[in-house]
Image: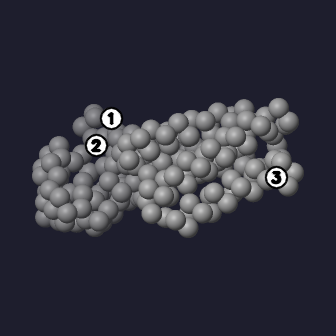
Amino acid sequence: SYIARLEDGTVFEKKGYDGEQPLEFITDEEQVIAGLDRVAATMKKEEWAIVTINHEYGFGNVEAKRDLATIPSCAKLYYEVEMMDFIKEKVPWEMNNQGKIEAAGRKKEEGNLLFKNGKYERAGKKYNKAADCVSEDGSFVDDEQKLVKSLRVSCWLNSAACCLKLKDYQGAIELCSKVIVEREAARGV
């Protein structure tokens, strides 16, 4: 839950008060302003925080209409935040092989949707997370290896495409180099 105020004390948004459900969101998904996203990612369960968010991490240079007031452009924001609870995403080493493969497939699909919507930076992160789920850790058995390698290579190539869209040519080179190494290893070169 949170209360959000402008510099003059005007409340422009309240979530989780007066019987209202608290705000639920997934971090790093652009569901809330960047400043609130960053704060939530660092908080513990039942922790309270009072934070100041500069306009670069708030609503930027635009005026924004919210539930209780309009936020002027370049506004500094003040949030009183309580982290009621959170669900931490499982990391690959907490999953069995099938879970890793399924998580990688899901993240790749999420990346594809983001890419189609022109959100290349976020798509690249999804592809990289997908590739990390099926990293070469020696845990995959022979019948899984072909699928895992194919998934990893396609994620690296998709992430390289994101880098190209963002004009991050060095990032694209690094990802394509991983693909070449993977394919040469598969051929025994």
Q: Find residue 185 and name its label.
A: 3
**Percent from the top left, x then y, of residue 46?**
46, 49
Q: Is residue 100 visible?
A: no
Of badges 2 and 3, nearer the viewer stands 3
- Using the numbered discs, state the Cα–Cα distance from disc 1 to disc 2 in whole angstroms: 7 Å
Identify which amino acid the numbered label 1 is placed on: Gln
The amino acid on which the numbered mark 2 sits, given as a three-letter code, is Lys
| 10 Å crowding of disc 3: few (<14), some (14-19), many (20+) | few
Task: Say which quarter of the image contains residue 115.
Answer: top left
SS class of the residue under badge 3? helix
- Residue at the spot x=68%, y=36% of the render? 101
User: What is the spatial separation of the Cα atoms under label 2 and label 3, in whole angstroms?
Assistant: 53 Å
Pointer 2: what residue? 15
Residue sitting at x 57%, y 35% = 106
In this view of the protein, which residue sits in the foreground, 138 or 73? 138
Asked if labels 2 and 1 touch by Cβ distance under 8 angstroms, the answer is yes
Decide: is 26 above or below 176: above
Against 26, residue 81 (above or below) is: below
Kindly report which numbered mark, 3 or 1, lies closer to the viewer in this rendering. Answer: 3
On the image, numbered disc 1 is attached to which residue? 21
Along the line of sight, which residue is nearer the eye, 25 or 158? 158
Left of 124 or right of it: where is 50?
Answer: left
First of labels 3, 1 by sequence position = 1
Q: Describe residue 175's horizontal placement relative to residue 165 as left or right.
A: right
Packing grade of label 1 (10 A; few <14, some 14-19, many >=20) is: few
Q: On the image, which quarter does residue 154 sit in?
A: top right
Between the C-alphas of marks 3 and 1, the distance is: 52 Å
Place of residue 114 in the rendered image (x, y in percent of width and height, measured from the top left): 43, 43
* Residue 84 horizontal/vertical position (percent): 43, 44
